[in-house]
Image: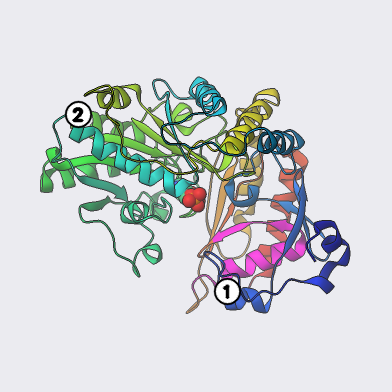
Amino acid sequence: MNDISDRRNAGLKNRPDLDAYWMPFTANRQFKADPRLLVAAKGMHYETEDGRRILDGASGLWCVNAGHGREEIAAAVGQQLLTLDYAPSFQMGHPLAFDFATALAKIAPDGLDRIFFTNSGSESVDTALKIALAYHRARGEGQRTRLIGREKGYHGVGFGGISVGGLVNNRRAFLTLPGAEHIGHTHDLARNAFSKGQPAHGAERADDLERLIALHGAETIAAVIVEPVAGSAGVLPPPVGYLERLRELCTRHGILLIFDEVITGFGRLGAPFAAQFFGVTPDIMTTAKGVTNGAFPMGAVFVGRHVHDAMMQGPGGAIELFHGYTYSGHPAACAAGLATLEIYRREALLTRAAEFAPGFEAAVHGLRDCPNVIDIRNLGLMAAVELSPREGAPGARGYEALNRAMRAGALIRYTGDTIALSPPLIATPDELLELVGVVRGVLNEIA
Ligand SMILES: Cc1ncc(COP(=O)(O)O)c(C=O)c1O
């Protein structure tokens, strides 16, 4: 049975064969024994195979910022596929890729107006790291090869991304790049638990970069990459002054600063990008997810004009960057992206989180007295509730929360024993309260 509406009507009776599909970042055997299948989505809600409506408290996977089933995006993609389904991306062009880059440049942080297209966050990260290396080499500083990430960072799953990433499980079964190192993370329950917004303590943790500079010499370091707000590690907003300090150190030592805005980009904090929200401008910025509202795979790397221009040299016929993807700037992705940006503009979604953040913050921090809660963190329309792990079973409470929330009618995310919330930016205040209410019920049920 291929027809989706037939499948919806048939419900549970027509569950697909689950064996062949190896699911990503999923406990496959556990899932297949007790699957959670979504069959449709509209606005703020998913629909499950048994016909239940589920409030989306996670924007899918931090990506569906404008809500589900947006007709303009579907129409733009459909029309584009019938007009020009594909154009070679190397040495050929098509108008929409230029139009979309121009539109993105208009909302970019100051100076970050040269755009390289990818198909995912992981590809955006690897692209940014490669641009950093190539930039230094083009300027005669090819010895700058070290790439610095941060503990607890998540930068996707490419070899570059896992090398600078700092989540141990994502690294330990694999090889990582030589020359990739990490500064310490900023998670500090002792000083910052239950902070509202940016925590007060920890700006000095940026100075950890000086340790690596002292150890290796700044002249060997190409770039530092951080998520302005760590997402996958469980929503860790930067301490007040931290990003400013990192920026200052990078500038002083000629090191490129990369913000990984795959989650924070496209309105999550109440500004188009975290760079603008914090007033700290990186040299390169990686994005994906919200760039097409999750409707089409795409990523975009925003490159500072100074970085880009330094590489536009040599003979006119020389390829300046030996890098790219078959689907860089795919016509349908660009159509989806342009339609998405138009929705964001028309509905003022890129700044809407600022309006609802205070109410969301108050509601989420109202969960403080629920059982096992050891921290609550929030910024814009993202928040986390950290639970103490069950003895001998870390992560068990988190997984139970996901399942119970699904049964209670809401989709949430969890990492370890931390529950993360990032509802679509179209959420009404009532829907935000409803989401927090579901989480309250779930927390009260989890022993
Ligand atoms: C900050 C960050 N960088 C990179 C990625 C990887 O993106 P993708 O899964 O599209 O490769 C993610 C995904 O969640 C992310 O949160």
Magenta-colored stretch includes residue 48: no
For label 2, count other residues whose C-alpha is less than 10 Å away and answer few (under 14), some (14-19) or many (20+): few
The answer to which of 285 and 189 lies nearer the viewer is 285
> Looking at the rendering, which quadrant does residue 379 occupy?
top right
> Looking at the rendering, which quadrant does residue 368 occupy?
bottom right
> Which amino acid lies under the numbered mark 2 shown in the image of this protein?
Arg
Instruction: Look at the numbered disc 1 and give the secondary structure of its residue.
Output: helix
Magenta-colored stretch includes residue 412: yes
The answer to which of 403 and 171 lies nearer the viewer is 171
Which region of the structure is painted magenta? 394-414
On the image, the x and y values in percent for residue 155 come to 41, 50
Q: Earlier in the sequence, mark 1 or mark 2?
A: 1
Q: Quadrant of the C terminus?
A: bottom right
Residue at which label 1 appears:
28
For label 1, count other residues whose C-alpha is less than 10 Å away and answer few (under 14), some (14-19) or many (20+): some
> Which amino acid lies under the numbered mark 1 shown in the image of this protein?
Asn
User: Would you say 142 lies left or right of 123 here?
Assistant: left
| Residue plotted at (73% across, 60% down) | 38
Q: Is residue 51 visible?
A: no
The answer to which of 390 and 67 lies nearer the viewer is 67
The answer to which of 227 and 193 lies nearer the viewer is 227
| Residue plotted at (51% across, 21% down) | 102
Q: Are marks 1 and 2 in contact (CB under 8 Å)?
A: no
User: Would you say 13 lies left or right of 324 here?
Assistant: right
On the image, the x and y values in percent for residue 361 come to 61, 41
On the image, the x and y values in percent for residue 343 come to 68, 29
Predominant SS of the magenta segment: helix
Q: Nearer the viewer, mark 1 or mark 2?
A: 1
Residue at which label 2 appears:
252
Q: Quadrant of the N terminus?
A: bottom right
